[in-house]
């Protein structure tokens, strides 16, 4: 049986220590997409939430207390190549976007965030993940 990719809300984890940015991302996604969003203020506890929540997309800031965004990306990629990861940062410059892609990020968002870009990226990545055949 084939399930319509829109049957269930997309599941997104946002790892962002700035409460205002996290609330902005959560609000935009809730308003524009069928989406359930969980927010973490640091990468601590990420693995437990991932296994419980099974996200379609992870959005992580680069600058986090403790384990940073690139380290979290590496940890995710070591376990799951199928999970879509988006890096977001206030750092300007193409070198961050290039490093993010080189280290396995599916996309990159520069702050201040464009709500249009945020929604388009999450929708594209979440739909793409759900349309892929399950790996057994």
Image (cartoon, rainbow, N blue to C red):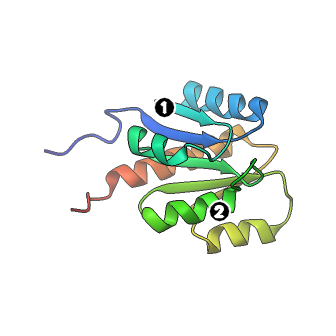
Image x and y of residue 94, in percent? 80, 69
Image x and y of residue 110, in percent? 77, 52
Q: Which residue is mark 2?
A: 71
Which residue does the image show at 63% across and 47% down from the upper left? 43
Which residue does the image show at 62% across and 30% down from the upper left? 26
As drawn, the residue found furthest toward the left would be 1
Q: Are marks 2 and 1 in contact (CB under 8 Å)?
A: no
> Is 95 above or below relative to 87?
below
> Is 27 above or below relative to 133?
above
In primary-sequence order, the first of circles 2 and 1 is 1
Q: Quadrant of residue 80?
A: bottom left
Mark 2 crowd level (few <14, some 14–19, many ≥20, 10 Å Cα): some
Q: Which residue is mark 1?
A: 35
Which residue does the image show at 67% across and 62% down from the upper left? 70
Q: Nearer the viewer, residue 1 or 71?
A: 71
Q: Is any atom of residue 81 visible in this view? A: no
Quarter the C terminus occupies: bottom left
Q: Quadrant of residue 21?
A: top right
Under circle 1, the secondary element is strand
Query: Is label 2 or label 1 in front?
Result: 2
Q: Nearer the viewer, residue 43 or 112?
A: 43
Q: Is any atom of residue 43 visible in this view? A: yes
As drawn, the residue found furthest toward the right would be 92
Mark 1 crowd level (few <14, some 14–19, many ≥20, 10 Å Cα): many
Image x and y of residue 84, in percent? 50, 55
Which residue does the image show at 71% across and 71% down from the upper left? 99
Where residue 63 is drawn, which disc sits there? none
């Amino acid at each position: 049986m084939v399930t319509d990719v829109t049957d269930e809300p997309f599941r997104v984890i946002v790892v962002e220590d700035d409460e205002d940015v996290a609330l902005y991302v959560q609000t935009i996604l809730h308003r524009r997409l069928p989406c359930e969003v969980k927010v973490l203020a640091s990468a601590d506890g990420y693995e437990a939430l991932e296994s419980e929540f099974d996200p379609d997309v992870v959005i992580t800031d680069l600058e986090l207390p403790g384990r940073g965004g690139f380290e979290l990306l590496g940890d995710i990629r070591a376990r799951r190549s199928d999970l879509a990861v988006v890096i977001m940062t206030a750092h300007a410059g193409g070198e961050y976007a290039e490093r993010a892609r080189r280290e396995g990020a599916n996309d990159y968002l520069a702050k201040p965030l464009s709500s249009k870009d945020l929604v388009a990226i999450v929708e594209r990545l979440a739909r793409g993940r759900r349309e892929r055949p399950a790996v057994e």
